[in-house]
Amino acid sequence: MQVILRRVTLPLSQTPDLRPVSLDACPALVLNADFRPLSYFPLSLCSWQDVIKAVYLDRVTVIEEYDRVVHSSTAAIRLPSVISLKEYISPAIYPNFTRFNLFLRDRFTCQYCGFVAGNGRELTFDHVIPRRLGGRTRWENITSACPGCNFEKGGRTPEKANMTLRSKPVRPTIYNLQNIGRCYPPNYLHDSWRDFLYWDSELDL
């Protein structure tokens, strides 16, 4: 069984708007069979078209619905706002080694000077032990750095450059990143999603 998750553009404000709501602004929160979101950051959302298809294929259970109704030639259907998978998907233990996951592990913060980048676009990654000294491109040797600190450090170790790491780079687990990701809730949360997100509580590890 597979549910296709697509990038969904959401409103940037929760201010009530009396204008008709676009169908594209009605994604569904996707929960695993244990009623936990498949992902917190980015939040696991599914477009309304894929949700309707999954419902008719009996792959998901509808938990909550929008007030919005769509019509087919034979039926009127309320759009689901929260769905859960009928079959549990076991999460991987470790995340993929990507720039985004690296920056998320480091909380979008330069690990040398503490500069915080709002979206990671102002960060680079740095080999703690330079490649010319045998340093490898792996979780335990890569850290987030602002361009200034990366340039200042150059091809030296932090000790040689007289720079101090704020945290030792480690390989995170999926649960580590999920916990960090919950510190960055999206700007828009539909009321029907809130009971399933637990932004203020810790995940069971």
Image (cartoon, helix red, strand yellow):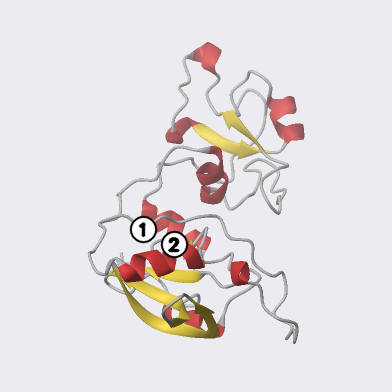
Give the answer, above or below, for where 82 lies relative to 9. Answer: below
Amino acid at the residue labelled 1: Val
Q: Are marks 2 and 1 in contact (CB under 8 Å)?
A: yes
Disc 2 and disc 1: Cα gap in Å?
8 Å
Q: Is residue 32 left or right of residue 146?
A: left
Secondary structure at badge 1 equals: loop
Q: Name the image quarter holding residue 185.
A: bottom right
In the rendered structure, find residue 50 and report the number of the disc placed on it: 2
One can see residue 187 in this view = yes
Left or right relative to 72: residue 9: right
Residue sitting at 77 percent across and 33 percent down? Answer: 148
Local packing at callout 1 (Cα closer than 10 Å; few below 14, some 14-19, many 20+) is some
Q: Residue at x 52, y 42 (%)?
A: 102
Q: Residues within 10 Å of mark 2 (few under 14, many from 20)?
A: some
Establish if 33 lies above or below 89.
Answer: below
User: What residue is pinned by disc 1?
Assistant: 3
- On the image, the x and y values in percent for residue 107 come to 58, 53
